[in-house]
Image: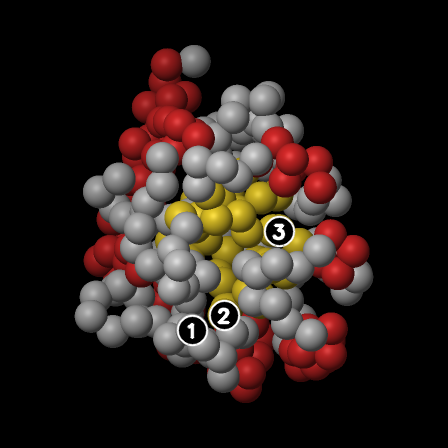
Amino acid sequence: MIIKNDITAIKICGLTSAENALEVVRLGVDAIGLVFYSESPRNVDLEVARQIVTHLPPFVSSVGLFVNPTRDQVLQTLELIDLTLLQFHGDEKPDFCSGFRKPYIKAVRVTDDVDLIEYGSMYAGASGLLLDAYSQGARGGTGETFDWDLIPSELEIPIVLAGGLTPNNVAAAIDCVRPWAVDVSSGVEGALKGLKETILVRDFINEVKNADARRITKL
């Protein structure tokens, strides 16, 4: 069965400034995501990323997102930035993902013909699978959802649910999937990609907490 918890962890991804990142952290998220992928509009400068991670308070995780990087690219990033967790969003193989002495999660773009049980077995060494919507032209941050019913109940690895989550649908997503964590990027942005809006982040966090509280009350 899927590994579930009663309190859903929250990750805000695609931060591009130290000020905005610390503002998001003060609202009470569990993790922040930094995109190290030059083709993304949320690609973060390495020095800015270093400043963000250096000033994170205790128990807030920093997650570095990579898309088909070379080994040297990951190592050079880790030399400058002490990331808590690596997130691989491309076609990286398990041996590559596990080769940096850091825990990692593997992103899967979900479609009707993707075998998530096979992915869970292949990436059994991962801390979890991040399930995202498929888009031909992007590797995430598209604002698109996928059919949550495609997630098999017998998947034995923690799930980080992503893909088109917003304050308006995250509670329903949690009720349906019971993920270990939820991951949002574009769903808490306005017109400017990479800049998270405080009111949207606050609303997102409140909806997650409300969904958890309702479930706990029913136990």
Distance of mark 1 from mark 2, alpha carbons? 8 Å
Q: For numbered disc 2, what is the local secondary structure? A: strand
Whether residue 55 is visible here, answered yes or no, is: no
* Residue 40, numbered circle: 1
Name which of mark 1 and mark 2 comes first in the sequence. Answer: 2
Q: For numbered disc 1, what is the local secondary structure? A: loop
Q: Amino acid at mark 1?
A: Ser
- Do labels 1 and 2 touch, CB within 8 Å? yes
4 or 124: nearer the viewer = 124
Name which of mark 2 and mark 3 comes first in the sequence. Answer: 2
Distance of mark 1 from mark 3, alpha carbons? 19 Å
Name which of mark 1 and mark 3 comes first in the sequence. Answer: 1
Residue at image location 31% in from the left, 40% down from the top: 170
**Residue named by callout 2:** 35
Whether residue 34 is visible here, answered yes or no, is: yes
**Residue named by callout 3:** 105
